[in-house]
Amino acid sequence: MCGIAGWIDYETDVGENASILNRMSNSLARRGPDTKGFHKERHACLLHRRLIVIDPKNGNQPMRIAYNDEDYTLVYNGELYNTDEIRKELLSLGYTFKGHSDTEVLLVSFIHWREKCVEKFNGIFAFAVWDTKEQTLFFARDRIGVKPLFFYNYEKGLIFASEIKTLLCNPKVTPGIDEEGLMEIFFIGPGRTPGNGIIKGIKELLPGEYAYFSKDNGLVRKKYWALKARPFEDNFNVAVEKTRYLVIDAVKRQLVSDVPLCCFLSGGLDSSIISKIAADYYVYNNKGQLSTYSVDYVDNEKYFQKSLFQPNSDSEYIEIMINAIKSKHHYVLLKNESLVKSLYEATLARDLPGMADIDSSLLLLCKEIKNEFTVALSGECSDEIFGGYPWYHNKEILFSNIFPWSRSLDIRKRILKKGLLKNADEYVRQKYLDTIKHTDKLLNESKINSRMREMFMLNINWFMQTLLDRKDRMSMYNGLEVRVPFCDYRIVEYAYNMPWEIKSFKGREKGILREAMKGILPDSIVFRKKSPYPKTHNPIYFDLVKKEIMKILKNKNSILSQILDYDNIYEIVEHPESMKSLWYGQLMGVEQVLAYIIQINYWLNEYKIDIT
């Protein structure tokens, strides 16, 4: 895992801009703390910051290979999980390799298959290849969008990077947002419209997309992967077996590492599955004892209250799993004061206001894990593909024609000055409809299966992307690589075409996954009701956030004073019970809304955002 960047300009010598290139490289230092590298030509410069995971000796980048009369240079962020299969195929075609890194396999794959190489890869990646002879850049992103890749396209030039802050190090890019950017922040945030970089001119390559940039043709983008509706031909028993195989295979593939590896373990179904498979793999391969990590908050048990979204706490289930897999477990207990303080660092990590303390807690957890490990496995994205969220099972919510995690815009409108963003409902509605329109279906599908395909697309294109964005930024900010086995595209494709009556076996969320794990996990874990990522329930957190908000509200000359309705925010602070609707799913209640405002204020000032 790494940080990558590059600058292509067909009218200037980019290599002469050493100070700019150094700033760009330094901005990625936290993603790649181990080594750095540059490849400079007159019209192109590729930058790389490396976090060493595989083949320390032979995996350095930028990686350059001369083949016949051609010359290719690669920068790459990610991991390939089918490296061995691709290497064997390339060896049979006559290619040779200096080391065992997936970096070298990826570059040779591009040399042989060109853009078709991405169809061969099973992994998470964002990479770019510069063709010196043709003076052309090729860049691509993995199918699911686990690894980020932002870019800024201007006349005869293109700048790309793993993070927005890196683009902003280049004077070609100015930190401004317009009405669309404000719509995204206040009515879509902390999510983003796919491909939207919020800051004017900044875009993100879409999941499953590649692009070419050349002097003659400019930027040409193409989608190489999308979910397609296909008849599901497996019966229930076969579906159980295939689900079990795909999940176990995905986890095992992602346990390959030349550096220490651990697992997140919350006691929920998804992290328990991954930890169990990993622990068994460690025993079978004599790799010692697996380490696992969980996070909680000071006095959380004291203040925990059951809800529709969080019916029980995690602690007893964590203990069950520790005993079952004999892992060396690490409890990370966070102070609420640290959560608030880290709201600012989490904003820097994400380059945008994010999921408030949901982000800052993950940042602190990753910081703790990094003290001992470089790689971790996590259970994200199972809920989106196997129907784990409550909105899949509540018919009133399921058939509402709106994003299920943000069914009302009332609280969002309430904090803004009246008349500032007049077409918010239409803006959000169109985003929803665009997703529905591009959902691939079979003819004559039942009403429920047709709707579940739409929900699948809404969740993986929007809600899941927010969580993946969060996971990448908070972990890589600490130089920690976090892998997400449930994002294996084979699992996603299989789950997309699975009928709802199979997927929700016995009317349960993730019913098929539970059935597939019977006999592997303890029954108490298999049949546990879904519980989300833990958040603080301690009232001290609200008090701390309130103090921070009051500092902002007292500044009548701030940028926010031109945007927000301070009177209504005072009302929310003094009467939090008046906030009737959730901001963004189950994780963002009143405390997180206030924390989100704190992050917005910090972002506007720290990044010197100009609102036009």
Image (cartoon, rainbow, N blue to C red):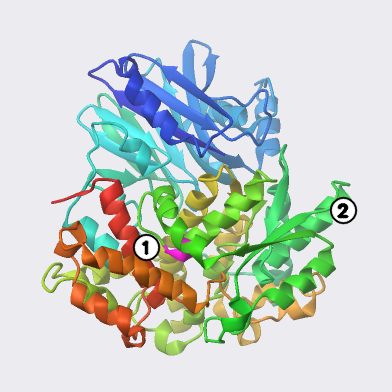
| Residue occupying the far top of the picture | 69
Amino acid under disc 2: Val
Which residue is the site of mark 1? 190
Q: Is residue 167 visible?
A: yes
Residue depicted at 84% across the width and 53% down the height: 289
State which mark lies toward you, 1 or 2: 1
Does the segment drawn in magenta span residue 302? no
**Residue density around tag 1, few if under 14, some if 14–19, many if 20 or more, within 10 Å:** many
Residue depicted at 59% across the width and 57% down the height: 365
Q: What residue range appears in magenta?
A: 355-359
**Quadrant housing residue 424:** bottom left
Is 584 located above or below residue 364 in the figure?
below
Give percent across and percent down for residue 73.
48, 22
| Viewer-side residue, 34 vs 258 | 34
Q: Is residue 332 left or right of residue 141?
A: right
Give percent across and percent down for residue 192.
34, 59
Q: Callout 1: helix, strand or loop?
A: loop
**Residue density around tag 2, few if under 14, some if 14–19, many if 20 or more, within 10 Å:** few
Mark before the other along the chain sequence, 1 or 2? 1
Amino acid under disc 1: Pro
| Viewer-side residue, 596 vs 320 | 596
Give the mark count. Answer: 2
Is 312 located above or below residue 459 in the figure?
below
User: Is the residue under label 2 in contact with that under label 1 (CB below 8 Å)?
Assistant: no
Q: Callout 2: helix, strand or loop?
A: helix
Give percent across and percent down for residue 418.
13, 74
Please tell me the numbered disc located at residue 283: 2
Q: Quadrant of the N terminus?
A: top right
| Viewer-side residue, 464 vs 449 | 464
Is 65 located above or below residue 483 in the figure?
above
Q: Which secondary structure dominates the residues rendered in magenta?
A: helix
